[in-house]
Amino acid sequence: MNVSDLIPGMQATIVKVKSETLSLKLFEMGVLPGEQVSLAHVAPFGDPIAIHVGEYKLCLRLEDAAEIEIVAN
């Protein structure tokens, strides 16, 4: 399951970031394995999405969100 598959109200834990090029950028923004994540908002046409990671919101394109593997809680 990926972050792009989240539905409102669903809590999940980040397992890993699949893309090596994207992983460093996301790690610097706090998207780390073991962090809790949930869906905050979806743009009117579905892309981008906003997620809660730790104690802040992060906006991601669906293409990037699909690179973050999660496990539902």
Image (tube, helix red, strand yellow):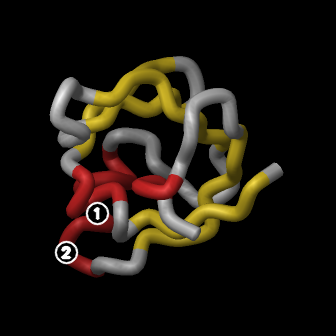
Say if 23 sits above or below 72 in the image.
below
Query: Which mark is on residue 21?
Result: 2
Residue corresponding to mark 1: 24
Residue 33 marker: none
Q: Quadrant of residue 36?
A: top right
Report if the CB atoms under discs 1 and 2 are less than 8 Å apart.
yes
Residue at the image point whose x is 61% and y is 62% from the top: 70
* Residue displayed at 28% across by 80% down: 20
Disc 2, SS: helix
- The x, y position of residue 26, in whole percent, is 32, 53
Relative to 24, 34 lies left or right: right
Name the quadrant containing residue 72: bottom right
* Towards the viewer: 61 or 34: 61
> Which of these two is toward me, 40 or 56?
40
Is 37 placed above or below 24 here? above
Q: Amino acid at mark 2?
A: Thr
Tag 1: residue type? Leu
Question: Residue 54 appears at what percent x and percent y?
Answer: 58, 29
Q: CA distance from mark 1 to mark 2?
A: 7 Å
Q: Is residue 61 above or below residue 14?
A: above
In the displayed structure, does residue 36 sit left or right of residue 66?
Answer: right
Residue at 67% x, 28% y: name it: 9
Is disc 1 surrounded by few (<14), some (14 to 19) or many (20+) residues within 10 Å?
Answer: some
Instruction: Using a 10 Å C-alpha cutoff, classify the residue at mark 2 as few (fewer than 14 neighbours), some (14 to 19) or many (20 or more).
Output: few
- Image point 33% across, 29% down: which residue? 42
Left or right? Give the position of 4 relative to 49: right
